[in-house]
Amino acid sequence: MRHICLALCLSVLALPGLAQEIEARKVYPGTGDHSLRIISTADLDVFHPYILAFQKARPDLTVEYSVASSVELYKAIRAEAEYDLALSSAMDLQMQLANDGFAQGYRSTRTDALPDWARWRDLIYAFTAEPAVVVLSTKVLGDRPLPATRQDLINLLRTHPDRFVNAVGTYDVRESGLGYLFATQEARSTDAYWRLSEVMGRLLPRLFCCSSQMVEEVIAGDLALAYNVLGSYASERLARETDDTIRIVRMEDFANVMLRTAIIPANARNTDDAGAMMDWLLEVGLRESADAWPLPPLNKSSAAATTGFGPIRLGPALMIYLDPLNRRAFLEEWENALEQ
Amino acid sequence: MIPQISIGRRLTALLAGVAAVLSLLSWSMVSGLARQAAAQSQDNVLAASATTIAETVRSEQGEVRLELPYSAFSMLGAISEDRVFYKVTAGGTLLTGYADLPAPRADPASGRITFQTEDYLGEAVRTASVRRNVLAGTRAVPVDVTVAQTLGGVRAISGQLSRTAAGLSIAFFIVAVGLSALAARTSLRPLNSFAQAVSRRGPSDLRPLRRDTPSELAPLRSALNRLMDRLGQSIRRSEDFIAEAAHRVRTPLATVRTQAEIALRSAPDADARQRLRQIIRAVDESSRSAGQLLDHATVAFRAEDLAQDRMDLGVLVTQTAAALEPTATMKDIRLELDTAPAHVNGDAVLLDSALRNILDNAIKYSPEETTVRIKVRAAEKTARITVSDDGPGLGDGPARALTGRFCRGSNTEGIIGSGLGLTIAAEVLEAHGGQLDLGPNPEGNGTCVTFVLPSA
Amino acid sequence: MRYLLVEDNAELADSVVKRLAMDGHAVDHALTLADADACLRTARYDLILLDVMLPDGDGRDFLARSRAQIETPVIVLTARAQVSDRVGALNQGADDYITKPFDFSELEARVRAVLRRRGGSARNEITLGTALFDPMSGNLRLGEDNVALRNRETRLLEVFARHPGQTFSKGQLLDRLFSFDADVTENAIEVYVGRLRRQIGPLGLRIETVRGLGYRLETE
Ligand SMILES: Nc1ncnc2c1ncn2[C@@H]1O[C@H](COP(=O)(O)OP(=O)(O)OP(=O)(O)O)[C@@H](O)[C@H]1O
Ligand SMILES: [Mg+2]
């Protein structure tokens, strides 16, 4: 184990020690004595089928699946908690881990088949491409058409503030790693972000830690609109719902596409099985059709084609917003906009 | 003796050696340059990155502030997938970044960028540092921005360029070796054709070489010419000596023989005549032996490097038979020729000598008023001369034995001979790749001698 | 016949002259090539016997030089019996050559062959009674009658013809007719004499047996 004295003091992340907050944990016992420990940001029910399918091929292997928030996951790996595979939706945090030497290299024919944008060195591999979407209830629209751009959204919120007071939800970027990633990337890419944030700020927005909660609240009718929800969660959840007044909208002016990535932590012990799991995830990730699995595929060709924007780029530039100074400055601005 | 390596191979090896040195040199130069260029471009990007960060440094209410622009790292990510580290200090205290990232060893001059190669987190990194002085409150605070990147990308690029250069160098080397071999062969061609010109020469051709040669070969040519000249002179001298010796011996013998013949005419009693006859026989015997010995030596000498002149055996037989005609007439022996064109390659002098010995035998051993038949025939692969006579035949012993040196048959009493005739004939035919067949004459009770020669 | 002998060895020359004279030939002797030139300018010869090694030059060079002017046939006397020399002599214009030491009957045979090749010479015919004898060709002529003799018979008749009225013993005839290596008995002489008698009888020539002495030619 390497004990690297890193004085990278990420204020919000610098929480004490090894006591990670694991939200859920499930063990899939295998027949043999090998076990593979996965830490992931994906909810148990979302990832359940993946583990079952993998275990069908490897019945001997015990799989231990822990769910944590992306920040917790980041902290756990940095604290050298013993996991064999870390799957996270927060690309920037994964990137930081890899850059700072907390990931180990892995290569196989599967990883070599990945497009360049879906990996960084031999450390990080993406296995899904998931867009950020808006989920809204059509009841609040009246006779207005579905908003297609942020400007449409701004107009909608401005014209009918009554319909949206206390009924707009978005990520609390101070807590959610993914929310922070979405927000920073969006702020970097379009100036409409800050205008929209200000408009939402006047409507007493409700802030969430996770996409699933926002989707639930929209379904329950507590929220009229949820902004920057993970499209994969939304469509997976809505597929189980009969109510057709709730719609998923993908912004046409700009849409973030997040890559869910996997790393093998530097201190992983069962690297062989971690590699096998990685290969299997990539196999699923590289499938051609979107259905059959809860999480969408990488979709090499169409992901870029539909919106004109590629997925968020893996690379050291992602670490820019993790810098405490930058983070402090961004959060200041964000709070000013949303908490009026 | 050390075995001599061929000049061609030596030349090829030499040129190939030069090519190898050049290839190595160019490879190391190209890889060196590639390394330099890759390192240079990394330095440039690191410098740009550090500068962009440094440009955001400002002071707000006496406090040093900065933000890291997205582009500062995205430009680093654009050239390679290398790990990136950074550190910003103000007056020695950390503002942000990796605290233990090695700082520039010397205080950088303001606005100047310093580069260092360091070890960080177990990997070699290249750092670029830039200093900016910021006025915080009343005092100027030096702000150092250091950006670092691992060297994997540079190494990959220069490694790949170096491999490409190695590939090119190897290709160049292979081509150069091919060309070297070609060059060696071309430059040795005059030597080879010179050697061929010498070896093409007939066995007794000692004329000086006149062909044009490159100046490098001129000394060889003149040395060779001098050698041939000396050789020619010594051969001439020994020929002159033999001629002189023969003259001095044979002239008195001729006198003795003539005197003996004259005496025989007038000798009254049988006893004296018998003695005179013996004298004459002895003279003839020694003369014959001397002649045959010299002929035999000549055959051995000329067979060593046999001339390969194309000739018609029919013509040869006609000429040789004509030369022996007078001798045959003395015994009223008829020479009956039956010739057809039959071409062979060989030494006409030797073949004439062989045939002469055979005809001489046929005439010598046949009784008076008989016929000697000479036939020339050509088959697909062989040409034959058959000489058959009506003489006493070769006797009971093995015919082959008669070709031995000084070997004479049992039927030779009173007939002069040295026992070398068949030896000479057999050796001549052997030298020509043919053979001498001896046997009884199938159409009578005499002898049949056959020359078998490969056709030309 | 008239010979020119070019030979620098006086002893050999003497004996050759003597030996040829015994057969009824006239021989001039030249010691050097210069002498030979002089002789050739003043007289005509039936044949030249030319030695190759002479004090004032090589006989073969002389041949090559003067072949154009001299029509007389040349037989070269050489001490060199080597194969390559034989070719050289003939190429340089000799009609034939003979190696020293030589047998006079072989010399005669060669001379006859050379002269025959050159077309013969009528002036060497010998008159025997009413018949004409050409010892060169072995022809015996009387008007329309023509007898061709073989070599031995010709030689035998020539012996008698050159010495008219002389009696020859069998031994003498043997020596003149056969080479010294031939293993012939005197009986053979009787056979040849018998044959010759039968052939020349019709032309009026007879060979008498002189009891105890030998044979003699009668020409009527
Ligand atoms: N045509 C022939 N008829 C009978 N015997 C012959 C004939 N040819 C060769 N011989 C025998 O073979 C022997 C060898 O012949 P060869 O020619 O080698 O020697 P040579 O004739 O005795 O001597 P020289 O060397 O002088 O010719 C002779 O001695 C003779 O016995
Ligand atoms: Mg012989």
Image (cartoon, coloured by chain):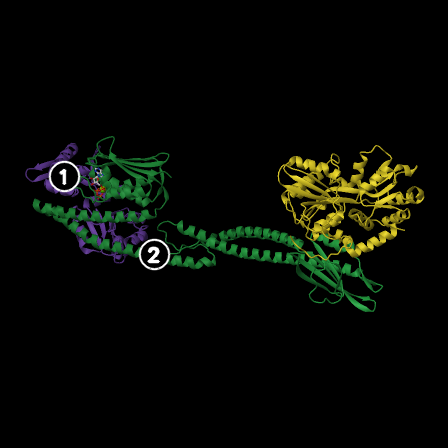
Chain colours: A yellow, B green, C purple
Residue position marked by numbered label 2 in the rendering: B231
Camera-nearest residue between A275 and B44 = A275
- Residue A226 x, y percent position in the rendering: 85, 42
Mark seen at residue A101: none
Q: Is residue B206 left or right of residue A76?
A: left
Tag 2 subunit: B
Q: Separation of disc 2 and disc 1 at Cα? A: 51 Å
Tag 1 subunit: C
Q: Is residue C110 above or below residue B62?
A: above
- Residue B162 x, y percent position in the rendering: 61, 54
| Amino acid type indicated by mark 1 | Val
| Number of numbered callouts drawn | 2
- Residue C138 x, y percent position in the rendering: 21, 38
* Residue at the top extreme, as displayed: B443
- Residue C74 x, y percent position in the rendering: 27, 48
Residue position marked by numbered label 1 in the rendering: C184
* Residue at the bottom extreme, as displayed: B138
Crowd around label 1: few <14 · some 14–19 · many ≥20 (10 Å):
few
| Amino acid type indicated by mark 2 | Leu
The residue at label 1 has a CB less than 8 Å from ligand 1:
no
Q: Is residue B154 left or right of residue B23?
A: right
Camera-nearest residue between B142 and A88 = A88
The residue at label 2 has a CB less than 8 Å from ligand 1:
no
The answer to whether residue C27 of the structure is visible from this angle is yes
- State which quadrant residue A289 falls in: top right
